[in-house]
Amino acid sequence: MLKKDLGLLLLILIVGTIVATINPRFLSPINLSNTANLIGLFGLFSLAQAFVIISGGIELSVGSIIALLGVVFIDLIANVGLHWGVAVIVVIAIGILMGMVHGLLVTKLGMQPFVVTLCGLLIYRGIARFYTQDATAGFAFGQSFPTLEWLTAGRSFGVPHSTIAFAIVALILAVVLHRSVYGRYLFAVGKNEEAARYSGIRTDRITIAAYVICCGLTAFASIFIAMYTRSISPASHGNFYELYAIAAAVLGGCSLRGGEGSILGVVLGTILLQVLQNLVNLLGIPSSLNFAVMGGVILIGVLADQQLVAYRQRGGAPRAAPAPAALQS
Amino acid sequence: MLDLVGISKTYPGVVALDRVDFSVAPGEVVGLIGENGAGKSTLMKILGGVVAPTSGAIQLDGRGYQALTVGDAIAGGIAFVHQELNLFENLDVAGNVLIGREPLWGGPLRLMDRAAMIAQVQPILARLGADFAPDAPLAELSLAQMQLVEIAKALALDARLVILDEPTSSLTLSETERLLRVIAELKAGGVGIVFISHRLHEVERCCDRVVVLRDGRVVGTLVGARIQHEEMIRLMIGRDLRSLYIPPQSPPGSVMLEIDGVRTAAFPERSVSLTVRRGEIVGLAGLVGAGRTELARAVFGIDKMLAGKLRLDGGDVAINSARDAIDQGLYLVPEDRKRSGVLIDMSIASNISLPDLAADARAFLIDTAAEADRAESQKRSLGIRAPGVATPVKSLSGGNQQKVVLAKWLAMRPRALIFDEPTRGIDVGAKGEIYALMRQLADGGVAIIMISSDMEEVIGVSDRIVVMHEGAVSGHLARADFSEQNVLLLAVGKTIAAERAAAGSAA
């Protein structure tokens, strides 16, 4: 565990203790279970985001993918009558396809990730609204899918299944990112794509795979989220979720310059964000201030971390001014 | 106007400049020539105030300095025009010429006064005989025109000493002619000029005096009629460099690497062919920009080859990516170590294992113990000086970083290796170690191409030299013909035979 992760854990414990002291309901089983469920739901696509960020890119269409695929999933099982197992496969396949398109546009056509995925954000949201004629997608009265509902929104031993899914996915991704050949390549590409290429890494494939993992996993998350909300209004479902994901990843130590980050960090980042949300609710802070609290904490957290790193590296000395580029030959 | 006396500059382990005297008078054009590494750029950095001399005195406009600052240099009227231009492609000519000193109006609003800018720049362009307007977008200008903008910038700063660094290297003949006229014009206006160039003909034509540097020392000053091509080359050439040579243990074997008619994007209309045998070190010499790095990049699969074939050990190989090249045992030690050679933030072990990670992995999972073992054995056999293989590469010296790049390839099975400037920025001791390693590899049957602009290295290490000039091979030299003169002549695009004939008819 890195110092960064330890600091984050400490922060979570401090915030948790403060909230629990002021409002003991924080530790009530129902509140903990609800928070755990939200951590699971948000954690799934935050982990997804981390892969793209480590590759040196960014994925802004997460929220819109969650809306579009949520709508599609519910439509497939509620109206088309597809077996939910098939619908799951279809939805994840669409997610993977989206990731592949994003990755190809970024690598083969040299477009900037920000632009590609911003367009994705707009396009998927538009399609989602058009798909349902801007109506809310949901189940008919009495319609139910017991197995699917148990799997996605159920609980075992009081632990929500979304949290369990998150834990399993996090473990798998931790192995992929920190132990596998692909993970090492991903860090290399994110750090210095040119040097990675000179070492024989097919950098395009690595980057495309990062988008595929991101969008595929986001599609998986979209099913959990759809089954949690059960009704989806395509204009607002999943709004700003990409920003939650980026926030969790950055809080967890991912650098937007790429090549840095850890699964544990993102998990802790997600937990901290949800605990903060919970804090706003439990302490009676007006919920309209929700985003402001989150923004403030992220800003202070990242700034403090940066200053600490700089302080440790240079022993407090200011950064040496680089020689003017004009005279370096 | 400018007078440097006894300037020395030492870096740890290297004497870059040794008691150099250098002066420029108003209206004088002084040529500064020397091989790569002779100390020209260090001297220019001292003039620009970027580097402080270790000892010596500087007189600029009658004021004495120990070392100039960038501000002193600008205030003293020194302006640089670099080979790589420092211009803003998204601005127009006037915007570039007056960058940072735009005439303003509107008081606190600080709006730019476009009319005043154009009025200010127009006469400067007229003086230079420029054929473009002050409001022309820079992106639409040719390289030669951009160079004029750079000179206009210097004049707008009221520069009295303009330093032109390789100004003609990317110009066509007629553009060069015009630049020489501009130089004459500036000279007539009392501006002092330092003209740094590898193109000795131009030096011959436009300079009043030529200072020749070699190994950080002024080895000769030629004035007036004594400025002659052959004399300049004679002075630039140093001692007999062939004495550094480590001979191979056995004569070279069969042809290992064959580059056949390869064209690259740098010179699409020219093709390069060359062969390297097992156990042979071929030095690929030439001036910077001759297309050598581009050739290496194309052969290694980083850039697309526009045409041509590669054969390894007699068999055709198709190389479309660096991965393909690596799978064939064809490796490249790139020119820019920090950008392309190593991942500076990663550990020694991760860098070494990167191209062959599958060998240290079981079912896609990295076996970190195996990885560390392999790195450890490379670290030992190459003598990489570091606390351990988990040490990040950025904390190593240049020489040890280069050894990490080498270790990466030696941990695999090299058949052919291309070294691009293998010892740039490396101290003398580590240089010797790298040369010994290259020879050891060659003796093990590897074919080696060594791209180098360091004359000492080219002559001291190669078994055979191939010289490139403007994207094509301009000549081959066997060891018996190795001399700096021959390499230089071929590098500037002359043939040795023709040069001998010319010398014969003159005599």
Image (cartoon, rainbow, N blue to C red):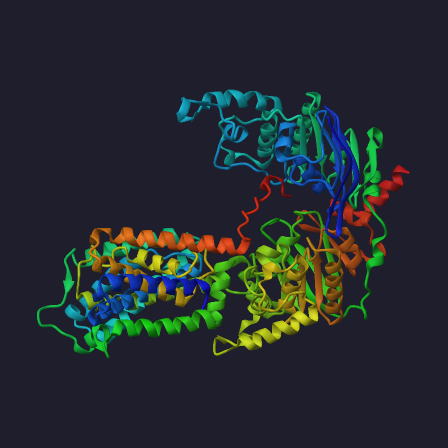
Answer left or right for A121 relative to B258. Answer: left
Farthest-out residue, front: A21
Answer left or right for A61 relative to B210. Answer: left
Residue A138 is situated, as x and y percent measured from the top left of the image, at: 15, 65
Q: Residue at x 29, y 74 (%)?
A: A164
Viewer-proximal residue among A289 and A206:
A289
Answer left or right for B67 relative to A76. Answer: right
Residue B375 is situated, as x and y percent measured from the top left of the image, at: 61, 71
**Is residue A211 among the parts visible in the rendering?**
no
Viewer-proximal residue among A263 and B439:
A263
Q: Residue at x 21, y 63 (%)?
A: A71
Quarter occupied by the N terminus of chain B: top right
Please determine whether, in this image, residue B68 is positioned above or below residue B275.
above
Q: Residue at x 73, y 71 (%)?
A: B445
Residue A148 is situated, as x and y percent measured from the top left of the image, at: 21, 75
Please determine whether, in this image, residue B104 is positioned above or below residue B484.
above
| Quadrant of the rendered image containing residue B416 | bottom right
Residue A304 is situated, as x and y percent measured from the top left of the image, at: 42, 54
Viewer-proximal residue among A207 and B158:
B158
Q: How many marks?
A: 0
Viewer-proximal residue among B403 and B389:
B389
**Is residue B191 among the parts visible in the rendering?**
yes
Farthest-out residue, left: A141
Quarter occupied by the C terminus of chain B: top right
| Quadrant of the rendered image containing residue A211 | bottom left
